[in-house]
Image (cartoon, helix red, strand yellow):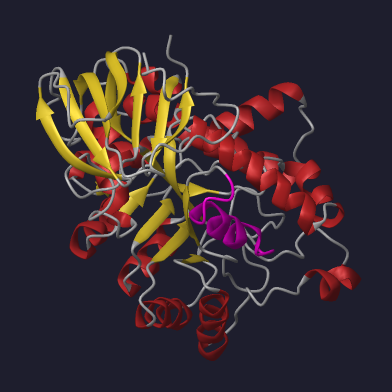
Amino acid sequence: MFRSAIGLALTCLVSITAAAEPVVIHAGHLLDRPGQAARGPSTIVIRDGKIESVADGIAAGPDGATIIDLRGHFVLPGLIDAHVHLTSDKAGTERQLISVTASTAARAYEAAVNARKTLEAGFTTVRNLGDSFGVTLALRDAIAAGKIAGPRIIDAGSAISTTSGHMDPTLGFREELAEALDVHDNLCDGVESCRRAVRVQIRRGVDVIKIATTGGVNSRISAGLGRQMFDDEVRALVETAHMYGRKVAVHAHGADGIAIALKAGADSIEHGTLLGDDEVDLFLRSGAYYVPTLSTINGYIERLAHDPNAYPPEIKAKIEWRIAVTGKSLRLAHERGVKIAFGTDAGVSLHGRNADEFELMVKYDMTPGEAIAAATVNAADLLSLSAELGSLEPGKRADIIAVDGDPLSDVTKLKSVAFVMRGGQVFKSGLQ
């Protein structure tokens, strides 16, 4: 399939952009602009990690070009997961134990492994929405520098909530341990405290701000899934983030927490489990994105099948509720025309299984083409990366994947990605 000069040994990173020589991909079918019709046989020319041209038909390309033969495959842009947690995929009681036993170094190695799994699954860009230890900020920079293989990372640093809110690291531990555990400045109570919490994350070098306006399914607190912030606190968080040019992703399950976030100008709502018509109206007026994260239920179901006591009772009850209502909000949002971006909450579900989300999105009324657009052009727009990613057009980064079969007919084809290129570098080739 490849010209012999490439000599791919893809247990290691392979660069095909070090030289100025162009690279040519011959595609059997090409979805260059998700949301539009796929093309037939096509030729993509890549130079210096970016797409130089896309043309119909199979052409030889420039002299001296390296040829990658994907004529037997369906080619499309690298996928984007707008909601992951790379530092772990443990949960429940096991996760609580690891939170006080695993060193930062151990977390860093696990994040690197999970990043590689994610990239090899065809996800060339991710938005990491929560890591209190600086691991994924460092991983982001190492990947960008070419020191390690992984997806491009847009990182939120530590997610922000109120004391006893979803992101409070002391929940579930003895009270006298709180001072030792609460060391990351991610909790805020009151306007000035919330402004400072955002500025602390900006100082750390984050790309996006993540906040929680409601409780969470995995929170070890009995306060439920309704709002846990006052209006002025949410406004202070969003306004401060926007002042520094950072978008705001909001963890919110309950309708009241969704509403206050959208009224304050949030850029995306994560989970959004209890959407109603009023909240959809707010979405449509604000232009915010909805990121459904349906895959969380896969993680819950699989862990409970393995160990019925994997979660403490107060969390297990919320999990059972979450499983029962999954998909209802997506159906309503999709029907009403809310902008939807792909996100899995990988970490709650397993890393490398990100494409399972596509199957769930289609189950709850999206077409395969709409689901793919959510993971490409829509997600790129949410991440403010439309000029670089999301479609295969001249001038954009050469983030390209290939699968066997047509994912526009059967979206599960995206669960088995045969070829992955990010920025002109080949990281996976399962081609025969």
Q: Residue at x 44, y 76 (%)?
A: 234
Q: Is residue 51 visible?
A: yes
Give the quadrant of residue 137.
bottom right
For residue 382, side relative to residue 131 (left or right): left
Find the residue positioned furthest to the front. Answer: 64
Q: In terms of depth relative to the viewer, which is nearer, 399 or 372? A: 399
Image quarter of residue 279: bottom left
Residue at image position (55%, 42%) is 149
**Which residue: 62% across, 33% down?**
300
**Residue 337 locus on image (x, y percent):** 18, 45
Residue positioned 76% across, 72% down in the render = 182
Front one among 153 and 168: 153
The quarter of the picture where residue 237 lies is bottom left
Tell me, yes or no, whether the highlighted magenta stretch contains residue 143: yes
Q: Judge by depth and name the residue closer to the eye, 364 or 35.
A: 35
Name the image quarter holding the N terminus. Answer: top left
Determine the residue located farthest toward the left in the rendered image.
56
The residue nearer to you, when weighing 15 against 102, is 15
Q: Is residue 367 above or below residue 131?
A: above
Magenta residue check for 199: no
Q: Over which residues does the magenta segment extend?
A: 132-148
Q: Position of residue 397 (x, y in %)?
A: 30, 47
